[in-house]
Amino acid sequence: MRYGMLLFAFALCAPVGSAAQTPACPQPLATLTVPPSNYAVVNGAPFEGRVYVYAPEIRTRGGSGSQQYQVWIVEGVYGKPFVQATGSLDQAGFDKLRQSPNVRATPVIVARGDGSGSGQFRIAKDTYRVQVTMNASKGSAVVVAVCR
């Protein structure tokens, strides 16, 4: 009886593989490709042209895959954080931009060796999910899908 209860307790605490992964987004609100050291606006009604994605320079490992990196979701609090819809920006310029009171920047950490990861960000009361994959055929550009 005691072993049965112990087995039951382990079964309840055991992680389920699919529960640990973020479910796929079958109908993203927006999908965009951002080259390294660039930013791009996230088009979509809920974002009103005030939400951007910034992709830093991404270092790859010797063989294949990437080292851990962060893709940033950049929200303009009082207005657009960038003048143009897309453009290039080095890390020092982005670090300076993040200090602005008009900017709320949320990192999405990509730690998988294949260059994919996921995270979330909030705008007002709404939470959005972000899925990131690396497109090595486009020079380590990242493909970002924003989901509800």
Image (tube, rainbow, N blue to C red):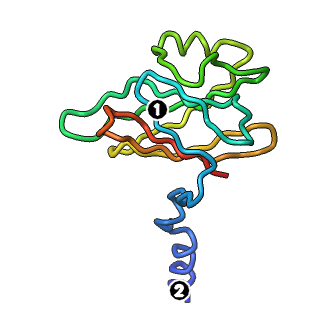
Residue at 68% over, 12% down: 100
Q: Are marks 2 and 1 in contact (CB under 8 Å)?
A: no
In which quadrant is the N terminus drawn?
bottom right
Q: Position of residue 132 (x, y in %)?
A: 47, 43
Q: Position of residue 89 (x, y in %)?
A: 49, 15
- Label 2, secondary structure: give it: helix
Tag in front: 2 or 1: 1
Mark pair 2, 1: CA separation = 53 Å
**Quarter holding residue 108:** top right
**Quarter holding residue 123:** top right
Q: How many marks?
A: 2
Where residue 4 is drawn, which disc sits there?
2
Where residue 34 is drawn, which disc sits there?
1
* Earlier-in-chain disc, 2 versus 1: 2
Residue at 19% over, 33% down: 62
- Label 1, secondary structure: give it: strand
**Quarter holding residue 107:** top right
Residue at 69% over, 30% down: 49
When the figure is inspected, residue 61 is found, relative to residue 101, above or below; the finding is below
When the figure is inspected, residue 47 is found, relative to residue 27, above or below; the finding is above
Q: Position of residue 30 (x, y in %)?
A: 60, 45
Residues packed near mark 2 inside 10 Å, few (<14), some (14 to 19) or many (20 plus): few
- Closer-to-camera residue (30/16): 30
Residue type indicated by callout 1: Val
- Closer-to-camera residue (127/83): 83
When the figure is inspected, residue 48 is found, relative to residue 99, above or below; the finding is below
